[in-house]
Image (tube, helix red, strand yellow):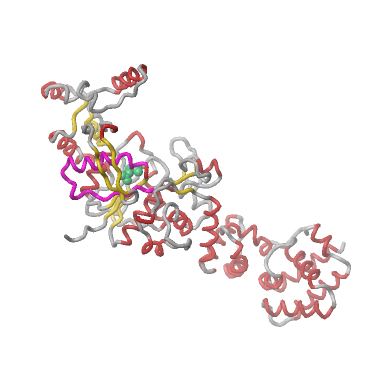
Amino acid sequence: MSERRVRVRFAPSPTGALHMGGVRTALFNYLFARQHGGDFLLRIEDTDSNRFVPGAEEYIIESLKWCGIQIDEGVSVGGPHAPYRQSERKDLYKKYADQLIASGNAYIAFDSAEALEQLRNSYEAEGKTFTYNYEVREQLATSLALSAEEVEQKIAAGEQYVVRFKMPENKEVVMHDLIRGEVVVNTSTLDDKVLYKSADLLPTYHLANIVDDYLMDISHVIRGEEWLPSLPLHVLLYRAFGWEDKMPQFAHLPLLLKPSGKGKLSKRDGDKLGFPVFPLFWTDPKTGETASGYREAGYLPEAFVNLLALLGWNPGNNQELFTIEELIPLFSLERVSKSGARFDPEKAKWFNQQHIQRLSVEELTPMVQAELAKLNVNAASEFVAKVTSTVKDRLVFAKDIWEQASFFFDAPTSYDEKVAAKFWSEDMVKATEDVAQILTSIAEFDTHTIETAIKEYIHNSGLKMGQVMNTLRLLLVGASKGPGIADIIAIVGREEAISRIVNGKNALSK
Ligand code: GLU
């Protein structure tokens, strides 16, 4: 038998911004597809019109693009199974619901929302929970209790109905999950899920999902753990349709946990705990509420992808830094853990710092320039490149440039008093004048020449190396921070360095 082509899908519902857990699901699907030379599909599951949020689909597509997750087939790119948006496939699901009714695996139920509400309440009053299942379905307004004529009459009279799956009573369903191994569930613990609604002529998630996975020839379903409880129903649907030979293999990914390790990382956690939980900034079109995103917080997509990859997966050794391309050959579902993956926002920053270091100065400079432009600092790229290269190892985010290197762009206007008290003295007047003189006269103006000339002068003058160097730093920067003195002088240039030294000396000797 030839091996089945790997075809996986990411099937989000456009109900709002895509949580980072959702992006991880997409990433794992993508890595799996790429590794096996298969296809990665994007299917939009929008059959629940009540939960539809405008802009959510665009947000999903933009998020995947930002992460470098390429869609082979699906919404936004098309393909042989188009359309890939379930609302546009609306008409094809009814016949599958009918097929299940005809084969005795589903039935029609006419209960109104009010009738169900009443039932729930009366059960509750007796301290019980109402479950729509084998115990009640033959006593309710269903095609199992009514005659065929009665059912037809009701439908002809325009009564609304739903199609429910007829969950068998007391059967063990044995399932195999690629991450969790064997999972066994007794069907008596499950209810008769709604598969189709006449009111909007739309299938529910369960029916549309199974039908589409089958029609789109999906070989592996890789999705979040929250869908594990639906697996028995899904497996039984494949059986009921007679599609078991085409049933995909299933893998349920562990939950992402809060930094405390307690509880699921929820959509609301992010801005409450001070880090984003969404890939991109999001404004809810209904409430106007906003949520921060990794992109806008200054994360590189490489860092975001890297941190997601390690939430629930590990390479089997200590390596922690990967690009998406490096992850493709290494990824495996066998190395995905069963237990929840704790998210650590501090570690997220570390990933960004590490990926910043992996960029060349040519790659990093335009990012730094963009951050400077936000502060209305416009400097030549060549100058920004020099600054960037000097402070690169101190950057966690490109935006840190200002904190780390503002003095390259603005001469100091004040001088740290504590530093001045420690290093400034009468004999520094002549020393700084001499250094200014040396800077005027040296022929080459590179770091090495500058450093040699200044050190030689200090050595010959008998002054203290630490005192002169710290004084020069104070005059050049205004405080005791920044890279090497000669680097600073070389980058700001001869004229600017001399002017800072002279101005600083004048200010401090007043
Ligand atoms: N539409 C479901 C979701 O929003 C898809 C779940 C699945 O992958 O089967 O996550």
Please tell me how many numbered marks the rendered image carries: 0
Provide the residue span drawn in magenta: 226-253
- Please identify the residue farthest to the bottom as the structure is shown: 443
Q: Quadrant of ligand 1?
A: top left
Residue 252 as seen in the image, left or right of residue 441:
left
Residue 211: image location, x then y, percent: 22, 43
Residue 230 in the magenta stretch? The answer is: yes
Regarding residue 59, the answer to whether it shows in the image is no
Residue 478 as seen in the image, left or right of residue 127:
right
Residue 43: image location, x then y, percent: 30, 48
Residue 182 in the magenta stretch? The answer is: no
**Up/down of 210 relative to 411, above or below:** above
- Please identify the residue farthest to the right as the structure is shown: 426
Regarding residue 212, the answer to whether it shows in the image is yes
Residue 380 as seen in the image, left or right of residue 422:
left
Residue 159: image location, x then y, percent: 20, 23
Quadrant of the drawing holding the C terminus: bottom right
- Of 243 and 76, which appears nearest the observer? 243
Mainly helix, strand or loop, the magenta region? helix
Residue 77: image location, x then y, percent: 30, 54
- Of 15 and 326, which appears nearest the observer? 326
Q: Residue at 21% x, 60% y: name it.
A: 3
Q: Residue at 44% x, 62% y: name it.
A: 323
